[in-house]
Each structure stands twice: as structure tokens, then as C-alpha cells.
Amino acid sequence: MDGAQTQVEQSFTLNSQQEQEMGEAKEATKERDAAIEAVSAWLSDFKTVARIAVEDKPQFLQALYISVGS
């Protein structure tokens, strides 16, 4: 009976650890998504400003890998 009790306790411990790690993974995913959203917003603003700043020199936009409308 003692061995079975130990296995049950180990199962609970491992399950608890797994749930904690899953929570940490979800939090890390939220942080990653927020960072990606912030960078995406910044890049959008940058592209807008770049298009205005060099509107008469489309080769500059191409050098920044920003598509130039035909």
C-alpha cells in the first residue's frame, strides 16, 4: 500500500507542476503576442512616415523593403 500511496502523491505533484508550466506558457504567449503587436504598430507608423519623407524617391523605399505602389 505504501508504494501505491507514493505513486499517487507523485502523480499529483507532477500534475501540479504540469499545470503551473502550462500557465507559465500561456502567460509567455500573451507577452509574445503583445510584443508582436507593439512592433507591428511601430512598423506601420514607420512605413507611413517613410513614404511621406521619401515620396519623390521610391528607390529609398525599395532599399527599406517597403513596397512601392505603381
Image (cartoon, rainbow, N blue to C red):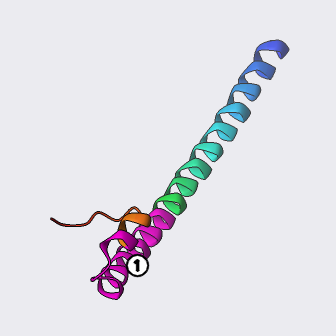
Q: Is residue 39 magenta?
A: yes
Q: Position of residue 10 (x, y in %)?
A: 76, 27
Q: Is residue 2 magenta?
A: no
- Residue at image location 27% in from the left, 83% down from the top: 56
Q: Quadrant of the N terminus?
A: top right
- Residue at image location 35% in from the left, 65% down from the top: 66
Magenta part of the protein: which range?
Answer: 34-60
The amino acid beneath tag 1 is Phe
Q: Position of residue 31 (x, y in %)?
A: 54, 62
Q: Is residue 27 above or below residue 69?
A: above
Residue under pointer 1: 46
Q: Position of residue 53 (x, y in %)?
A: 35, 87
- Residue at image location 71% in from the left, 23% down from the top: 8
Quarter of the rendering containing residue 58: bottom left
Q: Quadrant of the C terminus?
A: bottom left
52 with respect to 46 (left or right): left
